[in-house]
Image (cartoon, rainbow, N blue to C red):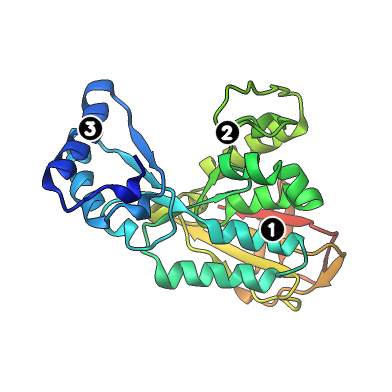
Amino acid sequence: EDVADLNFDNENLRQYMSDELVYWVEEVGIDGYRCDVAGMVPTSFWNEVRPRLDAVKPTFMLAEWQQPDLHEQAFSATYAWRWKEILQDIVKGEANAADLASYYADYQTKWPRNAMRMAYTDNHDQNTWDGLPQEIYGDAYELAKVLSFTGEGIPLIYNGQECANPNSLEFFEKDPIVWNCSDPINSFLKELVQLKTDNPALHNGDWGGRVEMIANSDPTNVLSFVRRKDGNEVVVIANLSAETQSFALSDDQLSGEHRDGTGMSVSLPGSEHTLPAWGYYVFTRG
């Protein structure tokens, strides 16, 4: 039965569904739920059931929805559809770096501080109906993954994505993944996971730092930001265009030594910088 047809004013239905959710945590030991089309169920129901789940054990709740009030009591994370849409529009030349900067401003003004929004470059719907991420993002794919791990939110690695699965997966059929874990994306994603794990500035929700935009001389094409937490700092500078861009940073707060991925020391903001099409820098300090 479609969830839209269910009557959540019926107390017996609410109790039954609540009991079922508790059962799988209490008796089977699962530690979280991904709730499909969560916004089609009254938020009051989710608010009622979350304390019952957490009374058994802390339960991670992911809503396939994009709505701030779902985070107030019920959900740990929601889908960041808007983040994905902006990135794909940028690749198509229909948006730019300023639009992504606006996304983070919206995140910080309209969403609770503990809200974790899932920034993804591939998922089950997109993979089946829209195509593979390497096809959708093209030369910008690596940069998109970097931003999904370094910006506010939580990244998603979809089934087979870590091994560059060459086929879109069937939606309702058994469709084995081609596991080619020698593909360079495997080691690349491991590096991003390690970076996010090791640096508190990149941790999720309240545990991590906010995105703070760094002023630069080309905000239409270049996104530059820093995240800080407990003396740790991650600086991300990204060329969100298909052309080489030269630019200067103008944030005096970044003065001092940072390290790049190889451990080499660099000074920021420094003089003019240049990035190739879809190029990026990730610098750390602390």
Residue 171 is tagged as 2
- Residue drawn at 58 percent across, 59 percent down: 83
Instruction: Examine the image and state in which quarter residue 34 appears.
Output: top left
* Quadrant occupied by the N terminus: top left
Badge 1, how many Cα within 10 Å: few under 14, some, many 20+? some
Q: CA distance from mark 2 to mark 3?
A: 25 Å
For residue 89, above or below residue 2: below
Q: Is residue 239 visible?
A: no
Amino acid identity at mark 2 = Phe
Q: Earlier in the sequence, mark 2 or mark 3?
A: 3
Residue 20 is tagged as 3
- Tell me the element at label 2: loop
For residue 56, above or below residue 39: above
Amino acid identity at mark 1 = Gln
- Where is residue 19? Give x, y as percent: 18, 34
- Residue drawn at 45 percent across, 69 percent down: 108
Do the CB atoms of the residues marked 1 and 3 lie less than 8 Å apart? no
- Depth check, mark 2 against mark 1: the one in front is 2
Q: Residue furthest left?
A: 11
